[in-house]
Every structure is written in structure tokens, then in C-alpha cells.
Amino acid sequence: MIINHPILGPRDAQEFVYLGDASLIDRPDGMTAGIESFHDYLYNRDNPAGLHRELWYHEQGDRSWLVVTRNTVSHEITSVELARDVARARGRSK
Amino acid sequence: MRYSGFRVIAEALTGHKGWKPVWRDPAPQAEYDYIIVGGGGHGLATAYYLAKEFGQARIAVLEKGYLGGGNVGRNTTIIRSNYLLDGNEPFYEFSLKLWEGLEQDFNYNAMVSQRGIINLIHTDAQRDAFTRRGNGMILNGADAEMLSRDQVKAMYPFLNFDNARFPIKGALMQRRGGTVRHDAVAWGYARGADMRGVDLIQNCEVTGMRIENGRILGVETSRGFIGAKKVGVAVAGSSSKVMAHAGMRLPMESHVLQAFVSEGLKPFIDGVMTFGAGHFYVSQSDKGGLVFGGDIDGYNSYAQRGNLPVIEDVAEGGMALMPAIGRARLLRTWGGIMDMSMDGSPIIDKTHVDGLYFNGGWCYGGFKATPASGWCFAHLLAKDEPHKTAAAYRFDRFLKGLMIDEKGQGAQPNLH
């Protein structure tokens, strides 16, 4: 698989480490969320057959985190964003 | 129709005209007491034991494709019970004992071959860890043996014992481990279930579940609605898709695992060998092909095919261990979809819906578990309580902090 890095251009997926579903960006607030929502956050996944937004880490490159939209049935990658931009758009790191 | 040596001779003398189809191809009835979703090894074993050991009737197995077309026909056929943790080892040892009596039990030749499995040791720390695991196995009634470097060398003199990074210092051996003809397992269970009146319904995909007031009434399928008092789901890599029909999100991800077969070679690997440090394991089939594999590809996938980097990685592992295979050609590679759970261990449990039961999360180790998985799932379905060897395989173990994490990797399915 080739991941089209927003800054570096097309890179081999072998340069990256895979973490999982991009919903991991949305960690519940530790001061207010209950144990159930942390359990769901940490352990449960949608695990779709089809489009999947997921976190890849460019360990052997610029060490950026990416949100890659990939089809889990065909392995086709349709969109690559910097995870930083995605997280900020969701109101994180203010 | 029972199989026997006499029967083979009698058929040979009469032109083999007496062999009949091994199972029926029935149309689905309107309602059953039990519906098992998934006609793979675990689903067929569940139906078989439900009928045979728990005396239940009116059972159907629904399979979206053909019987045994999923992981039971795609694995590398290894059986073993060399686990460490208390939640796992009694279950896998129960499974290995069932394997030992399986062919007599279901009157079908599954080519169960207890040729022994060794896990290679490269460091003192690893020897300590494997000694501990071996003791755990013995405490749970399994067999385990520590082999010295010389003992391994006597068995497999052609291994690269002096690899600079991973020199071979010994091995943990389980002599009762081995291999089984995987397709025959599916066929044997299917035939045994069919003989006891179970309807095996193929080309019948579950497309929805009818649930009212927290109770399951049946399943919607590509061949219409089928009612059921109890529904058990055993669909391996498709677990998340099927259980989504009941509104559930599961603690698992689907990943692709590849397997490989070389061209046929003269016999030189008697048993099963794992080289965990090099992400490689191998056995030799009765046809002579080396059957081997390594790690999962590492990203969510439902594709049933993998990518080239893992093929390269596995081939490198094989070459590091056995330089002699360098000129052997790879005949086939294929992939199967693993339901990788959050702690690397399976789930056999009730759900929040009355009458809906789940069996899954077998990661890449489901084949060896087939008999015990079927038995324990049948036990749960028939008696509404878990079998004593599967009592730890609960959904709520993540909430309660009772994970069964053999590798100690945490909630990271692609690392288990």
C-alpha cells in the first residue's frame, strides 16, 4: 500500500506503524467521563467492512500522525490528513 | 452411512456405487430451537455437540457461502495446548483431549497427527519464560518438555543454530501437539451433525436480527426470515458485521493473516516448529509442501488477501531459521480474516439480548480450539451457563480488568 503523505508525498506503508480507528482521537474527559465510556473508548470498535478512518504513525519518516481513510475490503486509500489538523478541527489542543 | 475398512473393501469390489452425498442440502424451515450462524469449524462443531452431547434437536446452521469455506479451510492446521494463563490453558487442554478422540467420536478420518510441536529458545530469559509456561501446562494436565540445544539438533540438524541475532539454545516441546487435516474437520463435523438431524443451510447469509423486548425472535436471511428460540453466532472475522445487527460494538478488529505453501519436498520436518523471534512457524504436509506463516499484516482488513511486505518478512524468517529452503519455490499464498480481540483471547458468552449468544475473538488461534469451542458453546446454548473451562471468556472481562493477555500487549489487537 502507498500512503500519500500530505507533506512528503507518496510513501510506502512499510514506513508507518498502525494504531487503529481514528476515533481514538476522541478520548473522553478523564475528569467527567464515567468508567463505561472509557471502557467503550479503549476496547470497543466499529470495525467496519468498507471505509475506515484510521491512525498511522510515520515512524521511519517525519514522525507525524496521519488520519488515513482506507477501504478495508479493497485496501484502497481515498484520503490522507494530518491527525493534528483533524484533532484541531474537533476542538482538541486549544 | 458409517465408514470402516470393511466398507472401503466392499465398495471397491462393487465399483464404488454405494457412496452417497455426505450431507443433505435442506431448505430452511420456518422455525428452529437453535440457529447457529456460521458454517465453519466452530459453528459445525457447536451444532454437532448440541445434538450429540446435549441431546438438543431442531438445529440449523446458516452459512453465507459453502461449509468450511472460511478460516477452517485457510489455516495452517496446527493443534497444541501450550498456553500459560489459567483462563486459557484448561480450555486448550480440553480441546487437545477432544482432538485425540475426535476421529473415533465422529467416525471420520481427520488425519490427526500428534507429531509434536517445539517453540525455539534463543536467550536465558526466554528459557525461564518457557520453563514457566511448561510448568503451567503440566499443572493443567498437559504435557511439556524442555529440550536442550543438542536435543533440538538431533531432531533438526539443518537449522541455523549459530545465527548471530537468534542462536538456538533449546526449545519447549509439547509431544501431543501436531497437525490435523483441516477440511476434514469441517466435513466430519458437518456429516456428524447432519446424521443427527441438523439442517446445514448454505448460501444463506444473515442480513438482520429480529429482536423484540430484548429477546431474539429469529434472523433475517437472504433466504427469508427464520425463527429461533436461541441464536448462536460463530462467524470469526465477520463477528463485528453480524453482531452489529443486534446493535453491538465488539472489543475486536478484523485483520488479515496470510499463510503459505511451498512446492512438495522430500520429508525433512517431522513436527511443527515455531520461531517466534523471527515471526515464522512451519510444518510439512503429508504431500511434502512446507506449510508456514508469520504475523498478521497489521491493519484492519476484510479482504481475505494480504500484501507483499509480510510475504517478504515471513520468507526472511524462514531463511534465517532454515537456509536450506532458499531454493524451494513458493507455491501458494492466501489470507483469512481474523477476529483479533483486545487481549488476544476469545469470547464465548451471552449478550444483552435474551437468546442471543456469541462465540468469537479467536484471533489467529481458532483452529486448535475447534472441538472445545464447539463443545463449550453448545454447553452455553443448551444450559445457559458457561462450561467450566470457558468461564473466563466473558464480554465483561475488559470492564472488570480480568483480561487474559498471553502476550501482555494491552488493548492493541494488531500486536497480539
Image (spheres, rainbow, N blue to C red):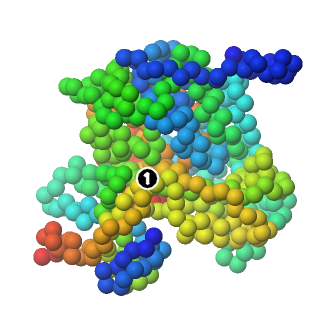
Which of B37/B344 is in front?
B37
Q: Secondary structure at mark 1?
A: loop
Q: Is residue B14 left or right of residue B69?
A: right
Label 1 sits on residue: B302
Q: Is residue A41 left or right of residue B33?
A: left
Give the vertical position of B360 relative to B220 (above or below).
below
Which of B137/B191 is in front?
B191
**Would you say residue A12 is visible in this rendering?**
yes
The percent position of residue B117, horizontal first and vertical second, equals 71, 50
**Would you say residue B377 is visible in this rendering?**
no
Give the vertical position of B245 relative to B306 (above or below).
above
Tell me the residue at 70%/23% (across/down): B107
The percent position of residue B369, horizontal first and vertical second, equals 56, 39
Q: Is residue B369 left or right of residue B249?
A: right
Which of B276/B399 is in front?
B276
Report the chain holding disc 1.
Answer: B
The percent position of residue B105, horizontal first and vertical second, equals 67, 23
The percent position of residue B363, horizontal first and vertical second, equals 49, 49
Residue A20 lies in quadrant? bottom left
Tell me the residue at 51%/25% (across/down): B200
Residue B214 lies in quadrant? top left
Of the 4 image quadrants, the one containing the C terminus of chain A is bottom left
